[in-house]
Image (cartoon, grey):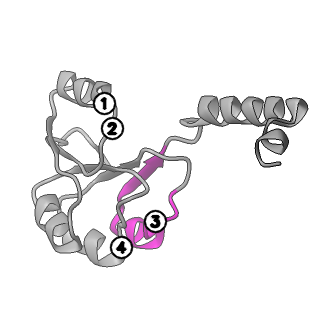
């Protein structure tokens, strides 16, 4: 499937502003609408070829089937657990995620927990 005809992308959750800039520099029209109901999401996707979302949004088979122009979906997360991958596959929609997107945050948290355990910070706090 050729993706040269992408013109409009919907972003349904708050993302870093650089995401907008990258898409706009690439010549795409970007629309950001947050907190959409299922019906509102379906309506917004009617004229979009691309869709970017986070873990908050549920992309069900109904949503995928109703989005007739949809060609590519990107999830700004490490998983694709709240998207019907089989429905997307049946329609030939490319699904992508960001597998290393939260690696730095996870590393920072792990280091913080190790320091807390080594210094017994929580133990002192709750005694």
Q: Is residue 36 above or below residue 23?
A: below
Sequence-first tag of 4 and 2: 2
Q: Secondary structure at mark 3?
A: loop
What's the residue at 38%, 59% (across, down)? 56
* Residue that label 2 marks: 15
- The magenta span reads 80-97
How far is disc 1 from disc 2 in space, using C-alphas? 7 Å
Q: In the rendered structure, are the residues bearing label 2 and label 3 in contact, judged by CB atoms less than 8 Å apart?
A: no
Sequence-first tag of 3 and 4: 4
Q: Which mark is residue 60?
A: 4
How far is disc 4 from disc 2 in space, using C-alphas? 21 Å
The image quarter in which residue 43 lies: bottom left
* Residue that label 1 marks: 19
Q: Secondary structure at mark 1?
A: helix
Sequence-first tag of 1 and 4: 1
For residue 84, side relative to residue 2 (left or right): right
Q: In the rendered structure, are the residues bearing label 1 and label 2 in contact, judged by CB atoms less than 8 Å apart?
A: yes
Q: In the rendered structure, are the residues bearing label 3 and label 1 in contact, judged by CB atoms less than 8 Å apart?
A: no
Q: Position of residue 49 (x, y in %)?
A: 20, 51
| Structural crowding at the residue carrying mark 4, measured as other residues with C-alpha within 10 Å and reported as few (<14), some (14–19) or many (≥20) | some
For residue 52, side relative to residue 125 (left or right): left
| Structural crowding at the residue carrying mark 1, measured as other residues with C-alpha within 10 Å and reported as few (<14), some (14–19) or many (≥20) | few
What's the residue at 83%, 48% (across, down)? 127
Q: In the rendered structure, are the residues bearing label 1 and label 4 in contact, judged by CB atoms less than 8 Å apart?
A: no
What's the residue at 16%, 34% (across, down)? 28
How far is disc 3 from disc 4 in space, using C-alphas? 8 Å
Q: Is residue 93 magenta?
A: yes
* Residue that label 3 marks: 82
Q: Secondary structure at mark 4?
A: loop
How far is disc 1 from disc 4 in space, using C-alphas? 24 Å
Q: Position of residue 47 (x, y in %)?
A: 10, 56
């Amino acid at each position: 499937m050729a993706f040269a005809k992408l013109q409009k992308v919907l972003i349904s959750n708050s993302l870093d502003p650089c995401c907008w800039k990258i898409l706009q520099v690439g010549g795409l029209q970007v629309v950001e609408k947050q907190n959409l109901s299922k019906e509102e999401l379906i309506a917004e996707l009617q004229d979009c070829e691309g869709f970017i979302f986070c873990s908050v949004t549920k992309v069900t088979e109904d949503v995928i089937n109703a989005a007739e122009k949809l060609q590519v979906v990107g999830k700004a997360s490490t998983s694709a657990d709240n998207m019907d991958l089989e429905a997307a596959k049946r329609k030939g929609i490319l699904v992508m995620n960001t597998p290393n997107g939260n690696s730095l945050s996870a590393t920072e948290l792990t280091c913080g927990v190790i320091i807390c355990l080594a210094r017994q910070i929580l133990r002192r706090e709750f005694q």
